[in-house]
Image (cartoon, helix red, strand yellow):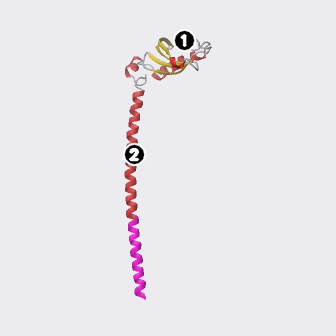
Amino acid sequence: MKKNIFLYLFIFSLLINVFTYMYFTNKMKFETTRIENLEIKANSLKDSLKMDVDKLYDANYFTLGQNDNAQEYFAGMDIEKIQIAVRDAIYSGNGKAGGNPLINYPQIEGRPFTINNYRILNNRWVIVDFSNGKVYGESILKYFVEDDGSITFETAESLLHANTFN
């Protein structure tokens, strides 16, 4: 009888050892595979992030903040303050009766044109998007920073998108 008990205990301990060995072996393989998959995903995300950073740099290439030559033109002046002054000067015309005077088009259907968006391209040009809520267009403006710090504009070119007329 003692032999049977020892035999059963031996078989039971052998089975426990086999199951424990298989569990830890499979767990280790699973963790290794999981780590490899996460490393692949992390590398993919790094590549994607690098591509997005490159796209952002390309998209911001034509801006005053990225253009070293344009910044040298304003040597000794605070570029941020110039950008804020240009923005304020552009948007200040939106509140005027008849629409923004920087837009060389009269009101259409009694709706004045206002500037919706802008981008400072360099030390001389600004591109603006404008609309009256129905008709949309774009303009290239020349801007000048006067000695007193004020901003003046000249409209270089404007267009209305023909497909927005109804």
In the image, residue 41 lies at what x, y percent? 40, 46
Q: Amino acid at mark 1?
A: Tyr
Quarter of the image for residue 79 reads top left
Residue that numbered label 2 is attached to = 42
Label 1 environment density (alpha carbons within 10 Å; few <14, some 14–19, many ≥20): some
Answer above or below: position of 163 versus 6.
Answer: above
In this view, which residue lies farthest toward the front? Answer: 166
Q: Amino acid at mark 2?
A: Ala
User: Residue 113 magenta-drawn?
Assistant: no
Answer above or below: position of 11 versus 120.
Answer: below
Answer above or below: position of 157 versus 37.
Answer: above
Label 2 environment density (alpha carbons within 10 Å; few <14, some 14–19, many ≥20): few
Q: Magenta residues: mostly which secondary structure?
A: helix
Of residues 127 and 143, the one nearer the viewer is 127
**Quadrant for the N terminus in the image:** bottom left
Q: Which is more N-terminal, label 1 or label 2?
A: 2
Q: Please provide the residue range marked out in magenta.
A: 1-23
**Circle number at residue 156:** none
In the image, residue 149 lies at what x, y percent? 50, 14
Residue that numbered label 1 is attached to = 105
Is residue 65 visible from the viewing direction of this image? Answer: yes
Q: What is the C-alpha distance between the residues marked 2 and 1?
A: 52 Å
Quarter of the image for residue 66 reads top left
> Residue shown at 38%/32% (left/top)?
54
Determine whether the residue tagged by mark 2 lies in a helix, strand or loop. Answer: helix
Left or right of residue 108: residue 22:
left
Left or right of residue 129: residue 64:
left
The mark closer to the camera, 2 or 1, is: 1
In the image, residue 128 lies at what x, y percent? 50, 19
Q: How many marks?
A: 2
> Residue shown at 38%/55% (left/top)?
33
